[in-house]
């Protein structure tokens, strides 16, 4: 059985920022599960028994090799999409997270080919479909 396809998956997603107005994004490799070659914020599945903020810290360490400076809940989102023609269902718990840019490096080179810091008003293309939603939510919450 596969989470997100055979049953609802729960994931934490995060918009990482540097505390000075820049957002960290990564470009997905051709080895990524989906949305290859697109710029994306980070995220990953919630593990059994894990708290949301604990999962955010673990995923940021795995993906970007960085520690959380400050974490703020942004929103929760029922994410219904298609992957290879099959419906997927994930519940995204999204955080806006400050990290130290000096610590950042690619922690998952099979999934990420490039990292970049961007102004929310000048994001790279092509983008993962959910990225725009998180940016809108962060603006509504006056986090960016």
Image (cartoon, helix red, strand yellow):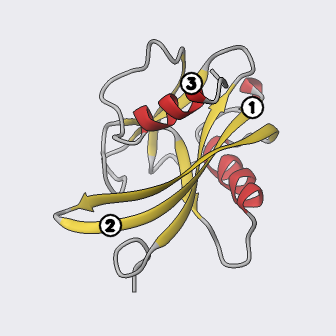
Seen from the viewer's position, the closer of residues 89 and 102 is 89
Tell me if residue 11 can be seen: yes
Instruction: Give the SS element for disc 2.
Output: strand
Farthest-out residue, front = 140
Answer with the quarter of the image where residue 50 lies.
bottom right
As measured in the structure, the alpha-carbon distance from the residue carrying label 1 to the one carrying label 3 is 16 Å
Answer with the quarter of the image where residue 19 lies.
top right
Farthest-out residue, left = 85
Does residue 142 sit above or below 127 in this rendering? Answer: above
Residue at the disc numbered 1: 98
Residue at the disc numbered 3: 139
Q: Which of marks 3 and 2 is in front?
A: 3
Q: Residue at x 67, y 25 (%)?
A: 143
Residue at the disc numbered 2: 88
What's the mark number on residue 52?
none
Tell me if residue 40 can be seen: no
Figure quadrant of the N terminus: bottom left
Residue 94: horizontal and vertical position, in percent? 60, 48
Q: Which of marks 1 and 3 is in front?
A: 3
Does residue 11 sit above or below 36 in this rendering? Answer: below
Between discs 1 and 3, the one toward the N terminus: 1
């Amino acid at each position: 059985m596969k989470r997100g396809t055979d049953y609802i998956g729960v994931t934490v997603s995060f918009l990482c920022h540097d505390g000075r107005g820049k957002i960290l994004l990564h470009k997905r490799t051709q080895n990524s599960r989906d949305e290859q070659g697109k710029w994306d914020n980070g995220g990953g599945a919630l593990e059994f028994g894990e708290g949301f903020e604990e999962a955010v810290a673990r995923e940021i360490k795995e993906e970007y090799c960085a520690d959380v400076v400050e974490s703020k809940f942004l929103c929760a989102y029922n994410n219904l999409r298609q992957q290879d023609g099959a419906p997927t269902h994930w519940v995204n718990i999204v955080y806006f997270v400050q990290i130290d840019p000096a610590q950042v490096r690619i922690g998952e080179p099979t999934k990420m080919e490039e990292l970049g810091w961007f102004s929310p008003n000048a994001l790279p293309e092509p983008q993962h479909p959910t990225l725009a939603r998180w940016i809108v939510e962060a603006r509504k919450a006056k986090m960016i």
